[in-house]
Image (tube, rainbow, N blue to C red):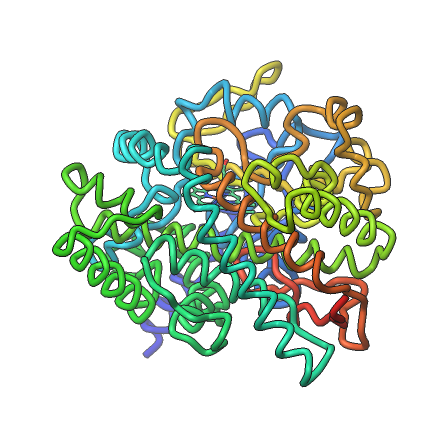
Amino acid sequence: MISTLYFVITIIILCYLWIKKRYRYWKDQGFLQEDATFPMGSFKNVGTKETEFEAFDSCYKKFKGKVQAVGIYSFLSPAILLIDLELIKNIYVKEFSSFQSRGMYYNEEVDPLSANLLTLDGQKWKERRVKLTQMFTSGKMKMMFEIIDSIGDKLVTVLENKLTESCNQDMRNWAQRFTADNIGNTSFGLECKCLEDENSKFMKYGRKMFDLSIFEVMRFMFSMSFPNISKKLGLRFFSKEVADFFYETFIQTFEYREKNNVQRNDFVSMLLELKDQFTKVQLAAESTLVFGGGYETSSTLMTFILYELALNPDIQQKLRDEIESRIEENDGKLTYEMLNELKFLDMVTNETLRKYPPIASGIRLCNKDYEIPGTNLTISSGIPVQINTYSLHHDPDYFPNPNTFDPERFNEENFKNIKPYTYAPFGYGPRICIGMRFGLMQSKIGIAKLVANFSFSPCEKTMIPMKYSTTNPFMAPQNGMWLKVERI
Ligand code: HEM
């Protein structure tokens, strides 16, 4: 009995010493570090009381001006948060060969859809990126414009009918239904009827992908911190239910198109053209990623544009005037070229992406020891590197009065003066968002249709100031985006 007690006490002491040593890693390397406590590390409230980007932001503010980069801990694993712009540029672009990977967890064996462009590394990523880039050229966007434009018209009709029940609408829900219909249509070739039915299968599984439970957030953070153990434990990236739904849906459309030689201006047909270079599972993985990448990010952008327009009626009217005058000049029809010429819409979109970057922090994994120029400090191979986009976008040194929504920051003159690497809603370097054009196109079409037909103002359920969901891996409002909507 006594010997068992001694054994247990010895184990506890050894664990305690090991944990203490772990949380001294950055000090031992000569870096300043954020304090850490077991088991969560530096950010014990992430996932419960605050979002990851808010926790990073407090750390950024605490260390800005003192160091170029600060050591942090995620659970027991050391990571580093970049502060200095020159260093950010080096890691995103100049030293890409040493920071090529995101170090994201994937498990090809138990969850093949998790191995996609977002998560893959090295040569596998490089080859896929080259092949998939051809799906996102402006020519391809123009081809898909008509599909999204007609779904935009449907958004107006369905929302209009709904207004007979209540003016107060959750515009996040509507934006999600619109982007889910767009992506379901272009990337799975299906009329998925998300606008007509908010409980349609695509909405159900789209939500399941991102509205995570606290347990799923912990599993995600754990797998990012301990990828090897996670692989041995057989942890998944997507839940089995979500992966099965997207896989089966894609394969059905793919095989139908192949058999019946159906051609359409959408992602499915483009993926079909690549069928000799990829396996079906790989194509299904990319199609699911297009859904994942395009559904939540773009609907988040639309949601926050509408929020700021509701809070700033003058800006809303100026935008409406621009859209209406251009559409009128063209017999009431929006075109791809016209969309790209709507300057004020572009400024509003950019300012929203500054204030509310849907992916609020960037990540790279160091795969070759890297000495920070001008110091004798080294980021060792295997260390995850965090760049908190939200902090850069809210830093008053780069964007004065950062909480003020001011699209003029992005007029032609002011845009030129924005310091490089301070504005990164789509990331930077060779791993910059591949779907940027598609994301901007669908969000702008949705906003142009909504603003030309409805007015938006705050209602009693509108959250002011904004509070963010702590369990969504992307930036998201805590309780939807309730606004008063009126037909004009
Ligand atoms: C407003 C909409 C969007 C925003 C704000 C956004 C933002 C981002 C950001 C910040 C990254 C990381 C870049 C980096 O690490 O440097 C990224 C990567 C990525 N995005 Fe987007 N995205 C959007 C829309 C889309 C759409 C519509 C798609 C697909 C159709 C997409 C697919 C991807 C993919 C595949 C990657 C990984 C690229 C790679 O590693 O090579 N995104 N996105």
The furthest residue to the front: 331
Left or right? Give the position of 305 relative to 179: right
Residue 114, x across and y down, in percent: 31, 53
Quarter of the figure that contains the N terminus: bottom left
Left or right? Give the position of 166 relative to 216: right
Q: Is residue 60 visible?
A: no
Nearest the camera: 326 or 41? 326
Identify the residue at horizontal 30%, vertical 63% (top origin).
Answer: 246
Residue 143, x across and y down, in percent: 41, 41
Quarter of the figure that contains the C terminus: bottom right
Q: Quadrant of residue 70?
A: top right
The furthest residue to the bottom: 165
Residue 36, x across and y down, in percent: 60, 51
Q: Is residue 483 visible?
A: yes
Identify the residue at horizontal 81%, vertical 32% (top origin).
Answer: 397
Left or right? Give the position of 417 relative to 471: right
Identify the residue at horizontal 35%, vertical 46% (top origin).
Answer: 265
Above or below, comparing residue 103 to residue 179 in the picture: above
Residue 233, x across and y down, in percent: 26, 61
Above or below, comparing residue 452 to residue 360 in the picture: below
Left or right? Give the position of 174 relative to 290: right
Identify the residue at horizontal 76%, vertical 52% (top origin).
Answer: 320
Above or below, comparing residue 312 to residue 127 in the picture: below
